[in-house]
Structures are given as structure tokens and as C-alpha cells.
Image (tube, rainbow, N blue to C red):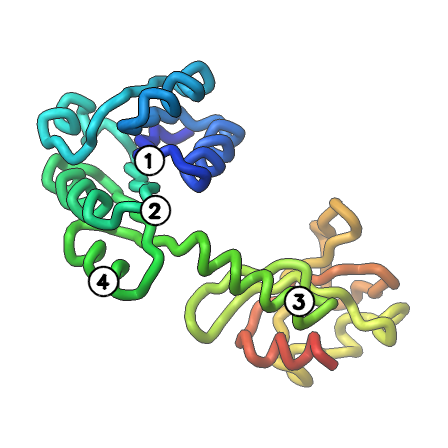
């Protein structure tokens, strides 16, 4: 369980907050909108109507006591930048800030952000990949070169063993595990026999996995 300060309760902030609560975290929310806080307050560990650009207001929250502080503001970059800087100055352990452009990311990192996220861009990229390949169900980008993908097992693999197919050598795919519906195979080995309808989680170079999925 983590202790999280979440600043900015727009759509992204609300969605993130709900996921953090679902995972059992203690979440304090802060927003300058009285309507938003009054609407959401009962769901959270604590809630505060405040202007977080004011240093005294932030100081009163005991910033070092949180495991992470998230600046989820998406419509006012100047506010996001100033709050990010203040959080770090006040001793925040880990600051995650939202950006919409690469330039914003650079400024946020220079001004105290430990991590910068692009929720809109990330969603758009995932959707674009899914739309261009019916075999891709999800993916996690690890860096500019490598990713983990959930893709469907080729029909011709059904009934064959992993060791015989040797996808690492032939296609550059490292198969981490296999999913059957919502069930994950937890004892997969080289003698695993693929079945029709299997999904596999594979690690490797993004371009190689996409090329394989498009075949």
C-alpha cells in the first residue's frame, strides 16, 4: 500500500485515483475546484480544496510523508510546472507529472519531476497499433527499441511444442508466458504445446514483434 498525493482531478486524475484506490492505496486528492472536491471527497482518504501553486498551502500537506506526488493537471502547463518545482523543493520523494508535448516533458524534468507521463499520446499510440494489427491485444513499451506484447498465437502453431518452433532464433521473440482467456500459464516450459486461441506475452524488439504479428 502506498500513500499518494494526487493534484488535479480532471478526467485523467479521476481515473488514476480510482485505480489507485482499487489497488488499496491511501490517496489524498487536491484541486482548486470546490465542486470537484465536494463530489469526490467521500471516496478518498482525504481531500482538499486548495490552490497548490501556493507554497504555504503545499507545505501544510506534509509533502515528504507521501510515497509519491502526482501532478495530473492537463490544461494549465504553467501551474503544472510551478507545482512540480514546489513539490520537489518541499521534499517530495517522487514526483510524477503529466505532459502533452516533448518540450513540456523537458521543462518538467528540469524543474523537479522524477517521471513524466503522456496519457493522451500513450493511448493514441496503443490504439494505432491495435487498429493496424488484429493480432495485437496489448503492449508495454519498455524503451524506444524494446516492448512486451500480448499477441495471438499463429493458427499453424496449434499442437506444436515451443522447443520445436524455436521463436527466439527464428523471429527474435522471447515468449514470457501464455494466456488462456483470463488464465495465465504459470508453469510454461520448452515442452509447452500451443493450443488454438492462445495468447502469448512476448518480449523483444518492437519492430520485430510487429513484423511477426503482421504476417
Q: Do the CB atoms of the residues marked 4 and 3 lie less than 8 Å apart?
A: no
Q: Which residue is mark 4?
A: 106
Where in the figure is residue 17, as x and y percent of width and height?
44, 32
Label 1 or label 2, whichever comes before in sequence order: 1
Label 4 or label 3, whichever comes before in sequence order: 4
Residue 117 is marked as none
Which is in the foreground here, disc 4 or disc 2? 2
Which is in the foreground here, disc 4 or disc 3? 3
Q: Which residue is mark 3?
A: 131
Residue at 43%, 28% in the rendered image = 25
Where in the figure is residue 11, as x and y percent of width and height?
45, 38
Marks 4 and 2, how far apart in space? 16 Å
Q: Relative to 134, is 93 on the left or the right?
A: left
Label 1 or label 3, whichever comes before in sequence order: 1
Determine the image quadrant of residue 38: top left
Label 3 or label 2, whichever comes before in sequence order: 2
Marks 3 and 2, how far apart in space? 26 Å
Residue 74 is marked as 2
Q: Which residue is mark 1?
A: 8
Amino acid at each position: 500500500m502506498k500513500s499518494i498525493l494526487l493534484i488535479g482531478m480532471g478526467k485523467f486524475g479521476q481515473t488514476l485515483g480510482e485505480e489507485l484506490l482499487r489497488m488499496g492505496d491511501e490517496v489524498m486528492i487536491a484541486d482548486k475546484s470546490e465542486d470537484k472536491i465536494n463530489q469526490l471527497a467521500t471516496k478518498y482518504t482525504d481531500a482538499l480544496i486548495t490552490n497548490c501553486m501556493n507554497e504555504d498551502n503545499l507545505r501544510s500537506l506534509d509533502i515528504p510523508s507521501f510515497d509519491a506526488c502526482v501532478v495530473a493537471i492537463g490544461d494549465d502547463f504553467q501551474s503544472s510546472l510551478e507545482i512540480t518545482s514546489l513539490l520537489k523543493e518541499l521534499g517530495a520523494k517522487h514526483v510524477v507529472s503529466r505532459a502533452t508535448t516533448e518540450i513540456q516533458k523537458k521543462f518538467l524534468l528540469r524543474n523537479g519531476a522524477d517521471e513524466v507521463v503522456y496519457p493522451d499520446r500513450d493511448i493514441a499510440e496503443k490504439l494505432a497499433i491495435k487498429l493496424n494489427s488484429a493480432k495485437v491485444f496489448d503492449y508495454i513499451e519498455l524503451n524506444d527499441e524494446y516492448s512486451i506484447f500480448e499477441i495471438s498465437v499463429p493458427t499453424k502453431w496449434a499442437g506444436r511444442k515451443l522447443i520445436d518452433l524455436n521463436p527466439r532464433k527464428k523471429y527474435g521473440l522471447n515468449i514470457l508466458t501464455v494466456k488462456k482467456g483470463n488464465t495465465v500459464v504459470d508453469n510454461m516450459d520448452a515442452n509447452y504445446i500451443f493450443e488454438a486461441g492462445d495468447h502469448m506475452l512476448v518480449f523483444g524488439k518492437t519492430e520485430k514483434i510487429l513484423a511477426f504479428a503482421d504476417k
